[in-house]
Amino acid sequence: DRIQRRLFESVYLLGSLA
C-alpha cells in the first residue's frame, strides 16, 4: 500500500537521524 511505503520512509529517515 502507499501508506505502508510512506511509513517505511519515515522509519528510514528516523533511523538515519538516530
Image (spheres, helix red, strand yellow):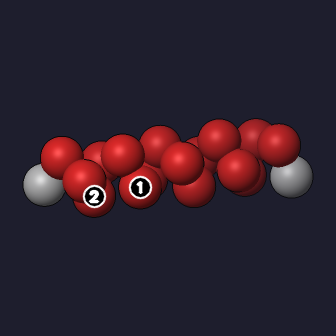
The circle drawn on residue 4 is 2
- Answer whether labels 1 and 2 touch (C-beta < 8 Å): yes
Q: Please, what secondary structure does the residue beneath circle 2 have?
A: helix
The circle drawn on residue 18 is none
Q: Quadrant of the N terminus?
A: bottom left
Q: Which residue is mark 1?
A: 7
Residue ID at (83%, 43%): 17
Is 5 left or right of 14, judged from the image as shown?
left
Residue 12 lies, in percent from the top left, at 59, 46
Residue ID at (43%, 53%): 8
**Amino acid type assigned to the residue bearing label 2 in the image:** Gln
Residue 2 lies, in percent from the top left, at 18, 46
- Above or below, comparing residue 4 to residue 9 in the picture: below
Q: Please, what secondary structure does the residue beneath circle 1 have?
A: helix
Is 12 left or right of 5, judged from the image as shown?
right
Residue 16 lies, in percent from the top left, at 76, 41
**Amino acid type assigned to the residue bearing label 1 in the image:** Leu
